[in-house]
Amino acid sequence: MSRARVSGVGSYVPENILTNSELEKIVDTSDDWIVERTGISERRIASPDQATSDLAFFAAAEAIGDAGLQASDIDLIIVATETPDHPFPPVACQLQHRLGCRSIAAFDVHLACTGFIAALHVAEKFIKSGSCRHALVVGADTLSRITDYTDRSTCILFSDGAGAFVLSAGDEASPDGIIHSAIHSNGEYFDAAIVPGGGSRHPQPHSEETKYKILMNGNRIFRLAVTLMSQSIKETLEHSGLTLDQVDWVIPHQANQRIIDAVGRTLDVPHEKMISTIRYYGNNSAATVPLAMDHSVKTGKIKRGDMVAMAAFGGGLGWGSALLKY
Ligand code: ACO
């Protein structure tokens, strides 16, 4: 059995910035309200000619380079997204071709904002079983395409971006790599965050444009997010026989600064150890965790050998966590 170690990280965000003051001109809101209630000052929005695979491509290429590998070394691609370029084909197949990878296994997973943790979990299994040596795992979303810019409770949150890891097979006896990962779901709350249309229940064309946009019960999700991410991190640590004192950094899904702070308080983790990039990037769903990781590596916060606990939650509901030594 091999251990899956993180050999490379990368990310990409579009150049276009949507600030709070610009949103003030679109919906009845204010910079003060958004900053106080969410911690977000600005978010990145894809240009009209950019789709999810474009964002994924730049993040993936950077992660492969960071791992010191060529595209031809990759033997598995998993893309987590809820906003693929098309209902099918999967973004992963487009990425495999555009990166110039060999004819390898490539598929998408869809667990909304928890998607990246789910993709990481699956890729880890491939590596552990010996079926692949180098797996490219990408979280990429263009939520701006499914955001209702007449709904002030959601349009202030969402953004576009991509983050990627390369997982490589390492020695099982080595302390580096993914120590434990887990994912969970509870479909009872399936409509707490939902895009009602565009699938087989309400296929396009439909007269109600907003059916194809995100509908969300923010309050309900807020409470569940804090409980489930905290619980998931505790369970992952317990399973690994480790304690929070041994964790250098916690990367929670970047949905709202108040959720990040509440998870920190629940776990009793000091504020400085809670990674937050939400101020400049908002919530780009499956991309937030790998983007925050890459950002923290590039800014010198997270270093090789650090113990990192990650957690995410989102539509489904789905939630999960991963503990790794970087
Ligand atoms: N500007 C000004 N006022 C606003 C805005 C806004 N942008 N949005 C809502 N309000 C108002 C509401 O209308 C309400 O007014 P009322 O009291 O007169 O009715 C008041 O502010 C309070 O509204 P709440 O919904 O209680 O505000 P809350 O503090 O809960 O913040 C928010 C709302 C930001 C959505 C928060 O609940 C949140 O972040 N929830 C989590 C969302 C999340 O994590 N989603 C991720 C999953 S989605 C996915 O998977 C893609």
Image (cartoon, rainbow, N blue to C red):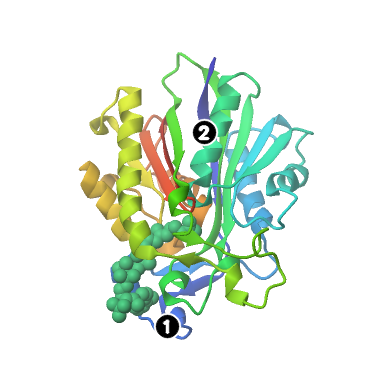
Q: Position of residue 204 (x, y in %)?
A: 71, 68
Q: Which mark is residue 16?
A: none
Label 2 packing within 10 angstroms: few (<14), some (14-19), many (20+): many
Q: Quadrant location of ligand 1? A: bottom left
Q: Report the quarter where the N terminus lies.
A: top right
Tell us which disc is closer to us: 2 or 1: 2
The answer to which of 187 and 100 lies nearer the viewer is 187
Q: Position of residue 314 (x, y in %)?
A: 45, 52
The three-letter amino acid code for the residue at tag 1 is Glu
Q: Position of residue 152 (x, y in %)?
A: 43, 76
The residue under the point 69% across, 58% down is 85
The residue under the point 47% across, 76% down is 151
Q: Which residue is mark 1?
A: 24
Tally the numbered discs: 2
Element under label 2? helix
**Relative to residue 65, is residue 6 drawn left or right?**
left
Q: Which mark is residue 121?
A: 2
Q: Report the quarter where the C terminus lies.
A: top left
Are circles 2 and 1 on residues that touch, CB within 8 Å?
no
Label 1 packing within 10 angstroms: few (<14), some (14-19), many (20+): some
The three-letter amino acid code for the residue at tag 2 is His
Q: Is mark 2 within 8 Å of ligand 1?
A: no
**Relative to residue 141, is residue 84 drawn left or right?**
right
- Residue 54 shows in this picture: yes
